Amino acid sequence: MAALQHKPVTILSPALQKLADDYITWRLQDTPEFASLSGFHDRDDCLDDMSLKAYHNRCDRCQEFLERTKVVEDELTHHVDFVNFKILQADLLTFIDGFPFTGFLMPLCYLSGVHLDFELLVSWMIFKTTEDYRKLLSRMENLPVQLKQIEELMREGIKKGIVNHSSSLAGVTESLTRFVVESAEESPLWNFFETFPDGMLPDDVADIQTCARTLITGRLSEGFKELRNFTENYKIATRSNPAINSLPNGDALYRQLVRFHTTTNMTPEEIHQVGKSEVARIEKEMAKIICELGYDMTVCDFSSFIRNDRKFYFNNPKDLLLEIQRLIHEVIAPRLPDIFTAVPKTELRVVADPSPDRTLAFYQPAAIDGSRPGLYKVNTQLCNAQPKYDLLTLSLHEGNPGHHLHSAYLLESPNMPLFRKIFEDRNYQQAPSRFPFYTAFMEGWALYAESLGFDMNLFEDPFDRYGHFSNEMYRACRLVVDTGLHCFGWTREEAVTYMTYHTALALENIENEVNRYIALPGQALAYKIGQLKIKQLRQKATSSLGKNFSLKEFHDVVLTNSGPLDLLDDEVNAWIEAYTPV
């Protein structure tokens, strides 16, 4: 048997190439903040239009592009064209199908929104010349308009009953208050005006700082104050029920969110049962390790024991960061060539995340222009809640071979069309009324990547292994808890109790997790659903191909077909069937 050689995805049809180019060009023009994130800086002086009219216009443009796909489809003759075509079509249909649910009427939550994301946006920009700083000043001049648009979206949400749960706004008004200042130095935005590149003229620096001071203490401070005051009053209108299905048309909304994040037709009821089955399976693995360690305890008791043993935690943020850097560069990196045909050239950098409102860690993709490396951001504010036994698994997930390798693979694929190289990994709270980032593949791959620690022989320490299964366990619990909250009427307390019983997560982490499920319904389902699909396909390929199975090539095929899970299923099965007798 001989394997079909992996071929990079490319666009061969001129009509499809034109459509794909027009589509991504429009997206980058329409959402300049997405352009900055992706490494395109022509519109670094502009902000996204967040008016209600703009969202309707986006849906209309998607309909126009969808009509064009119907014409292009008849001209496709090559298989790789169909792959790209299906993903482009899925992009458009996801936005169109989700638009009626108006997720954009909830533009703020404690995890995302202008109160956190404007600073991130500025960090994505480049600052080498006076003109670069002028672009930032232009963005700041436009920001009060966007702040007012956000308020108008939330007012419309109140009218239609599309509102956040109260817990989802915890800390938001305090975060907005950071920008309400009397002196510019009090604002977090002043950090971007303290140092300048060598070679800039002193007069230009002085002029830029003067303009920044005026904006920060004037229109920006007033704009943030108005949004803060409105958000404080908005809390009265928030829903008391954590379930998204308590909103008008809420059951249909949750099911659409499930489709958005899993890219499947699975129902919440089916996912709930899958979660319970996975919890039972993983609990057996955890019990084996407890016996191996010589403890006579239940999984629940052992998890409680190590959760509360301070020797498993770091004393300071510096030690936490140093250990993650060691794992990334000294432990994981040397083993990657064992299971991948190529290791990413794109730099991966571990950095502290200054925001106490974010999760324990997250990944920010590199910019396509090379101006920014891939960033593994660690919430050092939660240092005391990050167990040592979780770190290897966490680093496999956020770094290599997880999010960073996936993102870098797409960026470094020379023939991958641009619209597939970049995705808008922000504004999660606007789902399902937004373009997809194919959560099930993105997070499913990262969860699958955690298990590759076994293929690389990294889980020699039984506590690291226990941490691995504990992390997989809480992803399985997510299937039960997310659907429990939003479909079966669970309370927040029931969700916390379930997670506490079944995982070794610190209680603070568990409470943060449950708050996240309330704020981002359905997102937590993507990890396990995506991972199970990749594992199922690997098992099928292994059994079908026997000694001819190549793990490296399997990974190439999976990464090349990053997108909806039904597409991944089709393409891996086609790869299996393409093996022919010599």
Image (spheres, rainbow, N blue to C red):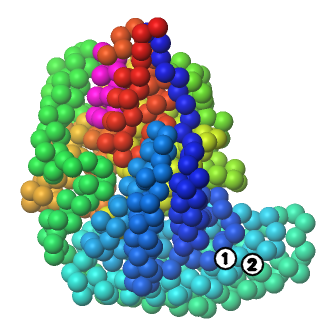
Please say whether residue 211 is one of the residues in the magenta stretch. no
Q: Amino acid at mark 1?
A: Asp
Q: CA gap, disc 1 to disc 2?
A: 8 Å
Q: Quadrant of the N terminus?
A: top left
Q: Residue 10: give x, y in percent of width and height.
A: 57, 42
Query: Which residue is located at x 75 percent, y 65 percent?
Result: 127
Residue at 89% over, 81% down: 203
Frontmost residue, 51 versus 521: 51
From this view, report whether residue 158 is shown above or below residue 507.
below
SS at mark 2 in the image: helix
In terms of depth relative to the viewer, which is nearer, 451 or 465?
A: 451
Residue 164, given in percent of the width and then of the height, sits at: 27, 73
Q: Residue at x 52, y 50 (%)?
A: 420
- The span shown in magenta is 532-543
Q: Earlier in the sequence, mark 1 or mark 2?
A: 1
Quadrant in the picture for residue 37: bottom right
Q: CB atoms at circles 1 and 2 under 8 Å apart? A: yes
> Which residue is label 1 attached to?
45
Question: Magenta region, mostly helix, strand or loop?
Answer: helix
Q: Is residue 183 visible?
A: no
Residue name at image x 60 percent, y 27 percent: 342
Q: Nearer the viewer, mark 1 or mark 2?
A: 1
- Evaluate whether residue 193 shows in this view: yes
**Residue 134, labelled with which disc?**
2
* Residue 119 as seen in the image, left or right of residue 545: right
